[in-house]
Amino acid sequence: QVQLQESGGGSVQAGGSLRLSCVASGYTYRSYCMGWFRQAPGKEREGVASFDSDGDAHYADSVKGRFIISQDNAKNILYLQMNSLKPEDTAMYYCAADSACNWYSPKWGQGTQVTVSS
């Protein structure tokens, strides 16, 4: 059973940084694509950053140059380094794992809240 546990969220001022972590368990980590999504109040969940089946990273245009996704395959941990944070980055951030790597029906973590004040 896939289990994903996020941590690292919090409240920061604009321009600050946070590092999110997602510990994965219950499955063969390397057999799934991993990614980060977020959902702001009143908005749909959107992709932030993810790895494809080749291990290449992809980013939403809104976070390119500011966020970095990485993973430690030995420890089954996914990271999201978020720099130069903006108020519009405020959202619940979710870790996701997808065996099909198409993000149609991934497994989700519970989420971690990120709040950026101006």
Image: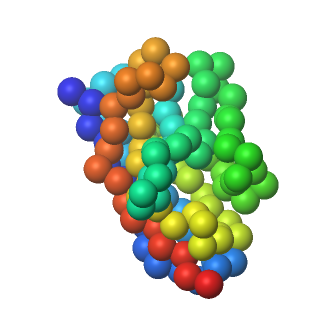
- At which x and y percent is residue 102? 52, 20
Residue at image location 43% in from the left, 73% down from the top: 10
* Quadrant the N terminus occupies: top left
What colour scheme has been applied to the protein in the rendered image? rainbow
**Horizontal side, residue 73 vs residue 89: left or right:** left
Q: Give the residue displayed 61% in from the left and 25% down from the top.
A: 52
Left or right side of 62 for 94 = left
Q: Which residue lies furthest to the top in this view?
A: 100
Q: Residue furthest left?
A: 1
- The number of callouts visible is 0
Residue at far right of view: 65
Would residue 87 be found to the left or right of residue 64 on screen? left
Q: Is residue 70 shown above or below 53?
A: below
Q: Which of 41 and 108 is in front in this view?
A: 41
Q: Nearer the viewer, residue 45 or 1?
A: 45
| Residue at left offset 67%, top offset 44% | 60
Instruction: Residue at 64%, 79% (x, y): give it.
Output: 14
Is residue 72 visible in the rendered image? The answer is no
Q: Where is residue 13 in the image (x, y as percent from the top left)?
A: 59, 83
Asked if residue 27 can be seen in this view, the reply is: yes
Which of the 4 quarters of the picture holds residue 105? top left
